[in-house]
């Protein structure tokens, strides 16, 4: 049995692989038939991880290898074992992502079966991202410190409550950013989610640095609420 950790050549997101069906709304696994090719020689762990760059986290819109979700990859003859995690426990995209890993792995020549195991220790953090992903999201060297140094909205007004818990994962970030884009300067909305939306913060930081505010109102374990505002620029 061989194992490998680390980063291999990142594929462009235009080559992204997703399961043949949309992510489930109920959290149930997606049933997709994957055709294995067991007659080919067994792949190397590097080949497997390279293929896993095609699996995209639907909330972050980025591949799961550079995000740091895959902890270990083992190859035993034609059977591949992936040990991985999610950005947060109870992630609504969990079944979608693990099904994507299984389906993409079964399409690698020489793979007869995939064993995808989820673990929660050590917990995922942004420090597990590769330098490529950290640069993409413009994550500073001390991300925990940056998260607490959000800008306050002057004369802020709570104009809307946005509960995204019933939305499928691939729709959540789009709806959140549309809501924020429609905010008048100086106003904010309350985001209600079923897990810590911290990855969303880093997407805001990458795309709207200095133009938004972020304040946790409720921090789990079942419900997370964050007040997100649009900064009123100084005259």
Image (cartoon, helix red, strand yellow):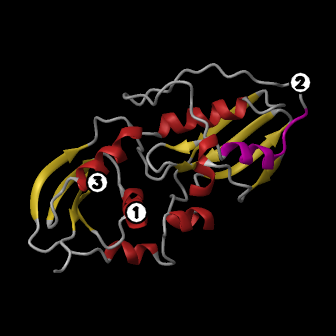
Residue visible at 55% across and 68% down?
135
Q: Secondary structure at mark 3?
A: loop
Segment colored magenta: 41-52
From the image, tell me which residue sits under label 3. 220
Disc 2: CA contacts within 10 A as few (<14), some (14-19) or many (>=20):
few
User: Which disc, if any, is residue 207?
Assistant: 1
Q: CA distance from mark 1 to mark 3?
A: 26 Å
Secondary-structure class at tag 1: helix
Looking at the rendered structure, the secondary structure element under dot 2 is loop
**Rendered position, 143 above or below 117:** below
Residue 39 is marked as 2
Residue 1 image offset from top left, x and y in percent:
84, 45
Q: Position of residue 138 (x, y in %)?
A: 49, 69
Left or right: residue 2 versus residue 138 is right
Marks 2/3: CA distance?
48 Å
Q: Name the one closer to the observer, 84 or 212.
A: 212
């Amino acid at each position: 049995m061989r194992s490998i950790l680390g980063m291999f050549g990142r594929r462009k997101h235009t080559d992204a692989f997703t399961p043949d069906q949309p992510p489930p709304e109920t959290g149930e696994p997606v049933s997709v038939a994957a055709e294995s090719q067991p007659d080919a020689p067994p792949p190397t762990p590097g080949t497997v991880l390279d293929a896993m760059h095609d699996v995209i986290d639907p909330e972050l819109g980025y591949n799961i290898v550079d995000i740091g979700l895959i902890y270990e990859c083992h190859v035993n003859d034609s059977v591949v074992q992936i040990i991985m995690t999610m950005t947060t426990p109870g992630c609504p995209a969990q079944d979608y992502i693990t099904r994507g890993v299984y389906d993409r792995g079964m399409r690698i020549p020489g793979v007869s079966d995939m064993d995808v195991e989820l673990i929660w220790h050590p917990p995922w953090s942004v420090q597990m991202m590769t330098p490529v992903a950290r640069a993409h999201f413009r994550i500073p060297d001390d991300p925990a410190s940056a998260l607490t140094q959000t800008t306050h909205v002057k004369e802020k007004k709570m104009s809307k409550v946005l509960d995204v818990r019933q939305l499928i994962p691939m729709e959540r970030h789009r709806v959140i950013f549309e809501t924020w884009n429609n905010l008048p300067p100086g106003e904010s909305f309350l985001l209600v989610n079923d897990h810590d939306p911290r990855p969303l913060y880093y997407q805001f930081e990458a795309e709207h640095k200095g133009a938004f505010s972020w304040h946790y109102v409720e921090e789990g374990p079942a419900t997370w609420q964050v007040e997100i505002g649009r900064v009123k620029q100084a005259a």
